[in-house]
Amino acid sequence: PEHDPVRDQGWYVNRRPRQGLLEEYGVRACTLVQFLGDAIVLPAGTLHQVQNFHSCIQVTEDFVSPEHLVQSFHLTQELRLLKEEINYDDKLQVKNILYHAVKEMVRALKMHEDEVEDMEDT
């Protein structure tokens, strides 16, 4: 429970282990080569690894929607088990997402309530 080779980024799965994943579990890997100016968008939940052949800068943007708050919370709990120096507790900012989702819901309900009151007054 204290070690996760997928999330701790200390492993690189080369050709032989990838072949084993395909044969044993049906997990198919693909290789993408990124050139200057290319952007790669990975679907949510996609496990991936990066091998840099040259010096580079990686810019990563995570997006977590309120609709996936439950999954984000579970992922945050899993990350907390890792004994790393990196603080994963607030990486996905689940509490902020929940706060803003509730705030928006209350605003929308208030607007709807105001519209219903205006219709009743006319």
Image: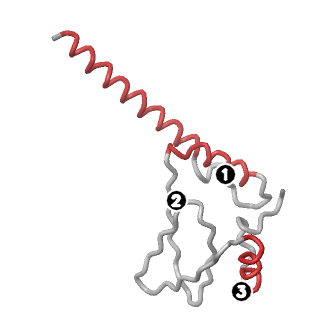
In the drawing, does residue 57 fall left or right of residue 24?
left
Residue beneath label 3, please?
A: 15
What kind of element bears circle 1? helix
Asked if the residue at tag 2 contacts the one at tag 1, i.e. Cβ–Cβ closer than 8 Å, the answer is no
**Distance from Cα at disc 1 to Cα at disc 2:** 13 Å
In the drawing, does residue 18 fall left or right of residue 96?
right
**Distance from Cα at disc 3 to Cα at disc 1:** 28 Å
Q: Amino acid at mark 2?
A: Asp
Upstream in sequence: badge 1 or badge 2: 2
In the drawing, does residue 106 fall left or right of residue 79?
left
Upstream in sequence: badge 3 or badge 1: 3
What kind of element bears circle 3? helix
Between 67 and 22, the residue placed more toward the observer is 22
Please rate how many residues cluster around mark 2, counting C-alpha atoms within 10 Å: few if below 14, some from 14 to 19, many from 20: few
Residue beneath label 2, please?
A: 62
Q: Amino acid at mark 1?
A: Leu
Q: Amino acid at mark 3?
A: Arg
Q: Residue at the far left: name it.
A: 122
Q: Residue at the far bottom: name it.
A: 53
> Which residue lies at the image location 36% right of the left edge and 29% below the top edge?
108
Q: Position of residue 13 (x, y in %)?
A: 72, 79
> Which residue lies at the image location 27% right of the left edge and 17% below the top edge?
116
Asked if the residue at tag 3 contacts the one at tag 2, i.e. Cβ–Cβ closer than 8 Å, the answer is no
Upstream in sequence: badge 2 or badge 3: 3
Residue beneath label 1, please?
A: 75
